Amino acid sequence: MKMERRGFLLVAGALALGAPFAARAQKTRIGIIGSGRVGSAIGAAWVKAGHEVMFSSRNLEHDRALAAQLGGGARAGTPQEAAAFGEVVMVSVPYRALPDVGKEHGALLKGKVVIDT
């Protein structure tokens, strides 16, 4: 009886530990609206973790330079392109700009996971 219980616990433990690793293996497309200090730092961590990230802001040249520096899954686009690109969209803009982001990109964000920083 002890061997059966140990075998069960071994398999159950392996499955429980394997689930987080399997979840990490899935790449997610993430759009970032606002690639300032916070947006670029979090986005860089996501690129390093293997996700595809599109950076956007009012300064497309800044976003292109950032994407080139990060390489891999990093790319640059307009805020509209980032909203359309991401399965998950992070909005990292000043509080006073949030109503404009909602008006301009709300339709593209509908049904997506939106993170506000």
Image (cartoon, helix red, strand yellow):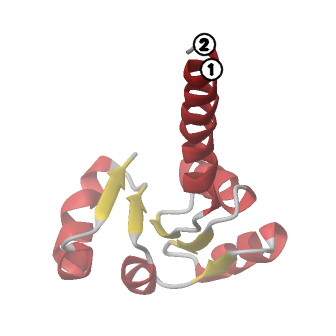
From the top left corner, tell me how far across and down residue 114 is, in percent.
31, 59
Crowdedness near tag 1: few (<14), some (14–19) or many (≥20) residues, C-alpha within 10 Å: few
Q: Is residue 50 left or right of residue 52?
A: right
Crowdedness near tag 2: few (<14), some (14–19) or many (≥20) residues, C-alpha within 10 Å: few
- Per the image, label 1 sits on a secondary structure element best described as helix
Q: Quadrant of residue 13?
A: top right
Kindly identify the residue that appears in the image at 57 percent across and 65 percent down.
Answer: 26
Kindly identify the residue that appears in the image at 81 percent across and 74 percent down.
Answer: 71
From the top left corner, tell me how far across and down residue 106 is, in percent.
19, 74
Q: Label 2 sits on what residue type?
A: Lys
Toward the top, the furthest residue is 2
Q: Is residue 34 left or right of residue 66?
A: left
Kindly identify the residue that appears in the image at 26 percent across and 53 percent down.
Answer: 96
Q: Is residue 70 left or right of residue 39?
A: right
From the top left corner, tell me how far across and down residue 20 is, in percent.
57, 44
Q: Which residue is mark 1?
A: 6
In the image, residue 48 sits, relative to residue 81, either above or below, namely: above
Total count of labels:
2
Give the number of the disc on residue 2. Answer: 2
Q: Are marks 1 and 2 in contact (CB under 8 Å)?
A: yes
Kindly identify the residue that appears in the image at 56 percent across and 62 percent down.
Answer: 35
Of residues 103 and 23, the one nearer the viewer is 23
